[in-house]
Amino acid sequence: MYQRELTIETHGEGEIVDLSAAVQDIVTASKIRTGLVTVFVKGSTVAVTTIEYETGVLSDLRRALDVMAPKDAAYEHDAAWGDGNGRSHVRAALIGPSITIPLQEGKLLTGTWQQIVMVELDVRPRRTRSVVCTVNGMKE
Amino acid sequence: MYQRELTIETHGEGEIVDLSAAVQDIVTASKIRTGLVTVFVKGSTVAVTTIEYETGVLSDLRRALDVMAPKDAAYEHDAAWGDGNGRSHVRAALIGPSITIPLQEGKLLTGTWQQIVMVELDVRPRRTRSVVCTVNGMKE
Amino acid sequence: MYQRELTIETHGEGEIVDLSAAVQDIVTASKIRTGLVTVFVKGSTVAVTTIEYETGVLSDLRRALDVMAPKDAAYEHDAAWGDGNGRSHVRAALIGPSITIPLQEGKLLTGTWQQIVMVELDVRPRRTRSVVCTVNGMKE
């Protein structure tokens, strides 16, 4: 089992970062050939999933999140704490913090148009995010 | 690999239970230091995710679920079976039954404001839920 | 660690395939008794979750997805690429590509009414999908 942490800087709400190459690098460094990699993001206003990393799709995802937890709704979290990020928490809980991807011959078994992404959901202009990648399997 | 089952009693629709301390106890008992813990809930009207365990946020999540699968919509499941929990099934399928969290030095690598939660989505006044925690890794 | 790929043919948008028996067969073939199985689907317009495999519930899930990412909305992906499957990408990213299920005595620890399903979200009349199942654990 091999574990490494990625540090990612984000620049605002709705930024979607393609982690695929960085996760593949960790898998390669682990020398594990058959197995799994779990990608987990620390924090309650950020999430991880897979998506086609194409400008239009990313924009469509942002709009769907705005339907599920709109910007202009009244959030009890905001009323209580004044953070203004009530929607960020809700969206993050719905998408989830972790995914697990199979490995074969040392390669991520994702589809051609399926990238691993971190979705920044907080409203602050700048955040440093920590993504923990854990590779588990056999070196053969 | 170390596996334990948590038994949790819930008291109604929308109850959100913080499992973080119980999951950490299982990790500690496993003596595994570096690795992963998978938290899985049995049942099709209950889900697992991470969220900041703060009253306002929990309430905001419940409201978002009510937008995605409203209480007053007509559910085919309810028409066919009269359970009245069509929305519970839909919400559970959207959030999902499992998450996987990395461990370092025997501790959950979650963010400070990121708790592991079980979301009771069924409409019955009382349920007994089973959460299976599986710890996998190295004792060093 | 034991890894097998399921090849599944689908016949249109919204088809939901029950994978439970096929996943259990892979677990049985692996001879692993205590552990985990991770079910991952390749592709960015398809997803995996658990649900009660009952006609009404499946139909209710499809309707909820149509609220979150409606058929008649304008998708930037569609404007740019003309694929007509902008909603498919969004829905797949929200549900997610992977789940992990615990095993005890060689059996999936799912609830009685909780089936493992693949949700076809693309709009093409016919697709061949690849689901990778990775079993990890102890043969005792």
Image (cartoon, coloured by chain):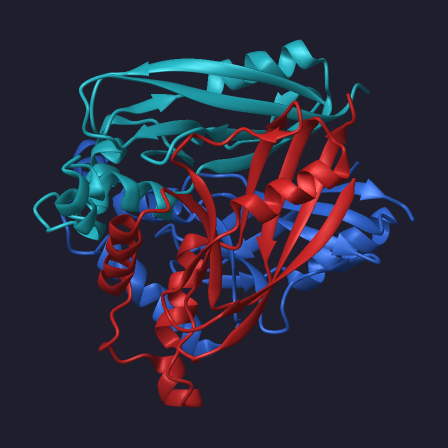
Chain colours: A cyan, B red, C blue
Placement of the N terminus of chain A among the 4 image quadrants: top right
Is C121 drawn above or below residue B135 in the view shown? Answer: below
Q: State whether residue B104 is above or below residue B59.
A: above
**What's the residue at 69%, 45% (across, down)?**
B134
Question: Residue at 24% of width from left, 30% of height from top?
Answer: A122
- Residue extending farthest left: A72
Q: Residue at point 21% right, 56% down?
A: C70
Decide if residue A85 is on the left or right side of residue C22: left
Q: Residue at x 50, y 30 (%)?
A: A40
Q: Position of residue A91 (x, y in %)?
A: 29, 44
Can I make out residue C133 in this image? Answer: no
Question: How many numbered circles does the render carry?
Answer: 0
Tell which of A126 and A59 is nearer to you: A126
Residue B133 horizontal side relative to residue B70, left or right: right
Question: Is B74 rendered above or below residue B114?
Answer: below
Q: Position of residue B73 (x, y in %)?
A: 24, 76
Counting from the top left corner in percent of width and height, residue A31 is at 72, 13
Q: In which quarter of the image is residue C12?
A: bottom left
